[in-house]
Image (cartoon, rainbow, N blue to C red):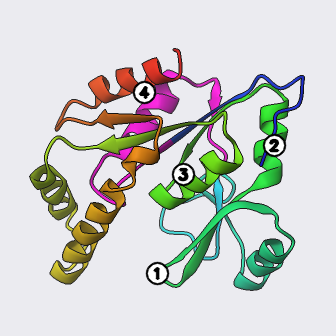
């Protein structure tokens, strides 16, 4: 558990939601554009960079052995293994930023968000949802990135993730084509 030091007045906002289609990335970008004083520390992963991703901005890209060494030394606040790669949030950068009164925003999967909330109770965790299940499916299909089997797997996972939203401080509905409304609700949740 990270306990803020007496001098720490930093804030931590964690944006989460179903693994695809809720609009987490869109809302994160809108939030950071409107609030440039907030910091978005990158996660660490063993997967290679995708086109357009930058080391230290999008992720810290490390090899599997280095990740596993850090995992054994208990350097992560949360980790996840999926699609053949490790992903995790390093503890030291988060602790250091909170101790300097920084305002942080992270985008995490549902399980990672719950794990972070357990370790950093002062964090504000927000579950991004859609108004109806059909909207989620429509958004996933419009991305045109997944096979039908992958779409069905994502929809099944989304149902499981929906069941966990009761563990979040706030549930924000991201209505189709109205992300500014969801952003305003997130801002209200963190006192902006």
The label shown at residue 186 is 4
Whether pointer 1 and pointer 4 mark residues with C-beta atoms closer than 8 Å, the reply is no
**Secondary structure found at label 3:** helix
- Please tell me which of labels 1 and 4 falls first in the chain: 1
Q: Which residues are magenta?
A: 15-41
Identify the residue at image location x=70%, y=49%: 119
Please identify the quarter of the rendering in which residue 74 is found. bottom right
Which residue is labeled 2 in the image? Answer: 95
Nearer the observer, 2 or 10: 2
The image shows residue 56, relative to residue 192, as above or below, that is below
Comparing 138 with 188, the one in front is 188
Give the CA distance from mark 2 to mark 4: 23 Å
The CA span between labels 3 and 4 is 16 Å
Q: The residue tagged with tag 1: helix, strand or loop?
A: loop
| Image mark for residue 113 | 3
Residue drawn 63% across and 67% down?
79
Q: State if disc 1 and disc 2 touch (CB < 8 Å).
A: no
The quarter of the displayed image where residue 5 is located: top right
Q: Secondary structure at mark 4?
A: helix
Residue that extends furthest to the top in the rendered view of this protein = 192
- Lower sequence index among marks 2 and 1: 1
Q: Which mark is residue 83?
A: 1
Mark 1, residues whose alpha carbon is within 10 Å: few (<14), some, or many (≥20)? few
Tell me which residue sits at (46%, 30%) in the image. Answer: 31
Q: Is the residue 145 above or below the residue 169 in the image?
A: below
Q: Earlier in the sequence, mark 3 or mark 4?
A: 3
**Mark 3 or mark 4, which is nearer to you?**
3
- Where in the figure is residue 188, as x and y percent of width and height? 44, 18
């Amino acid at each position: 558990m990270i306990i803020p030091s007496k001098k720490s007045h930093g804030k931590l906002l964690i944006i989460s939601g179903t693994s695809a289609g809720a609009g987490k990335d869109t809302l994160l970008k809108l939030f950071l554009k409107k609030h440039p004083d907030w910091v978005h520390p990158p996660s660490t992963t063993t997967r290679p960079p995708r086109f357009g991703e930058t080391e230290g901005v999008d992720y810290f890209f490390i090899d599997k052995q280095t990740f596993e060494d850090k995992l054994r030394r208990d350097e992560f606040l949360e980790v996840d293994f999926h699609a053949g790669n490790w992903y995790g949030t390093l503890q030291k950068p988060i602790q250091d930023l909170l101790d300097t009164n920084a305002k942080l925003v992270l985008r995490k999967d549902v399980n990672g968000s719950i794990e972070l909330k357990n370790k950093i109770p002062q964090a504000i965790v927000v579950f991004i949802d859609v108004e109806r299940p059909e909207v989620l499916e429509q958004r996933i299909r419009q991305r045109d990135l997944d096979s039908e089997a992958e779409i069905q797997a994502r929809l099944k996972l989304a149902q499981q993730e929906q069941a966990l939203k009761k563990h979040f401080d706030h549930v924000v509905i991201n209505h189709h084509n109205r992300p500014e409304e969801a952003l305003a609700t997130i801002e209200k949740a963190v006192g902006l």
